[in-house]
Amino acid sequence: MGTLRVIGGTARGIRLKPVPGDTTRPITDIVKEALFNILGDEVVDARVLDLFAGTGAVAIEALSRGAESAFLLDKSAQAVRVIHENLAAARLSERAHVRRGDAFAYLATAPERTYDLVYVAPPQYKEMWQKAMDLLDQQPARLSDAGQVIVQINPLEWVDRNYANLVEFDRRKYGDTLLIFFEKRQRENDMQS
């Protein structure tokens, strides 16, 4: 695996520490650059929820590019420690809230706030992304009206699913990484853009 770094914005070039071991699924620079090219200005002033945050690389990239705030959640104490170190290195700690906890337990609670970007990149091959999506679908108030949920999985994990409140609007494949983009289903006229 190559060096993790911030590739754009105020913290550009800052190296990020990896989480030791193989429990996290780090995003490659190629995928991260593609993701943020797709998101473009939608990151500016966004409230970001990074579930299964790992190194914090996605939320840190978003903050570096002008996101208003980020909430990073990971159940690993080691990951939480690395996230704090990476936020400090990027000088972005003041706009981030980091919590050690279970993503599913968090998603099962009533939403305290809405998010514009929700990033779901759980450990591979455990069907965890499906469980996270089911919980997000049950609580559509967690996502702002123009918000997006982005799932990062291995293409082999993909299973077509229909959701009551979320609908897929884009999908991109980069080698062994698949990014799937979801938005709120439009109730009045369920026309896809």
Image (cartoon, grey):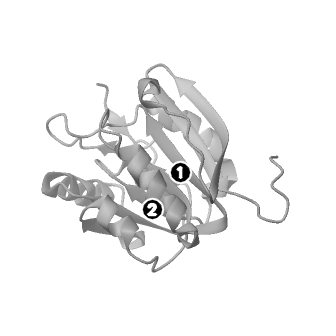
Give above or below for 24 relative to 155.
below
Residue picked out by circle 2? 49
Q: Tell me: residue 47, above or below residue 120.
A: below
Q: Which residue is drawn at 14% across and 58% down?
A: 77
- Real-space Cα separation, disc 1 to disc 2, in angstroms: 19 Å
Hey, what amino acid is under mark 1? Gly
Asked whether residue 64 is in view, the answer is no
Looking at the picture, how far across and down is residue 122, in whole percent?
34, 44
Kindly identify which numbered label has been placed on residue 9.
Answer: 1
Horizontal side of 124 relative to 135 (left or right) equals left
Name the side, left or right, on which 173 lies relative to 91: right
Task: Label 1: state its secondary structure.
Answer: loop
User: Residue at the spot x=34%, y=52% of the render?
Assistant: 56
Q: Quarter holding the N terminus?
A: top left
Identified at 47% across, 55% down, the residue is: 134
Q: Which of 16 and 70 is in front in this view?
A: 70
Name, please, the residue furthest toward the top: 175
Q: What element carries label 2?
A: strand
Task: Please state which of residues 157 and 94 is positioned toward the viewer in this rendering.
Answer: 157
Measuring from the top left, give residue 192's x and y in whole percent: 80, 47
Q: Are marks 1 and 2 in contact (CB under 8 Å)?
A: no
Mark 1, Cα crowd under 10 Å, few <14 / some 14-19 / many 20+, is some
Residue 32: x and y, percent?
A: 49, 37
| Residue in the image at 55% along x and 25% along y | 173
Q: Which amino acid does label 2 sit on?
A: Leu
x and y percentages locating residue 188 in the rendered image = 83, 65
Specify few, some or many for label 2: CA neighbours under 10 Å numbering under 14, 14-19, or 20 or more: many
Question: Mark 1, mark 2: which one is toward the viewer?
Answer: 2
Give residue 4's quadrant in the image: top left
Tell me which label, 1 or 2, sits earlier in the chain.
1
